[in-house]
Image (cartoon, grey):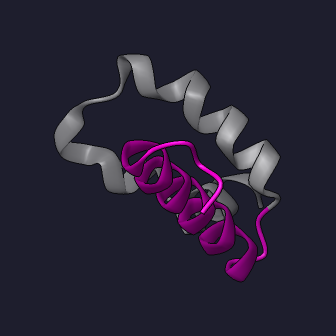
Amino acid sequence: MFAGSEGGGKAMAIVFSLIETAKLNDVDPQAWLTWVLGQIADHIITRLEELLPWRYAAQAA
């Protein structure tokens, strides 16, 4: 729509999906994304499921 390019539109769709998934799991999207960005650099790629919103909610509780 207003993404500027097809690639931009795809990136926006991914980000919007992540934000809405966090909201559906009663997780603050900004807090979760901040936490993920702090974890992802040293995280093992085969264990990405550990960075999902519902895992964050379980750890924060």
Based on the picture, tell me whether residue 4 belongs to the magenta stretch. Answer: yes
What x and y, as percent, mark residue 55?
54, 61
- Is 39 placed above or below 48 here? above
Tell me the quarter of the picture where residue 35 sits.
top right
Question: On the rendered structure, is 56 left or right of 45?
Answer: right
Residue farthest bottom in this picture: 24
What is the quadrant of the N terminus in the image? bottom right
Nearer to us in this view, 29 or 17: 17
Q: Is residue 24 magenta?
A: yes
Total marks placed = 0
* Relative vertical location of residue 39 with respect to residue 60 in this rendering, above or below: above
Where in the figure is residue 41, as x and y percent of width and height?
41, 18
Question: The C terminus lies in which quarter of the figure?
Answer: bottom right
Front position in the image: 53 or 10: 10
Residue at the location (45% across, 44% down)? Answer: 5
Q: From the viewer's side, name the closer residue of 45 and 21.
A: 21
| Magenta range | 1-27
Which residue corresponds to the image point at 47% horizontal and 57% vertical from the top-left? 14
Q: Position of residue 52 (x, y in %)?
A: 49, 58
In the picture, measured across the screen, residue 21 lies left or right of residue 39, that is right
Q: Residue at x 39, y 51 (%)?
A: 6
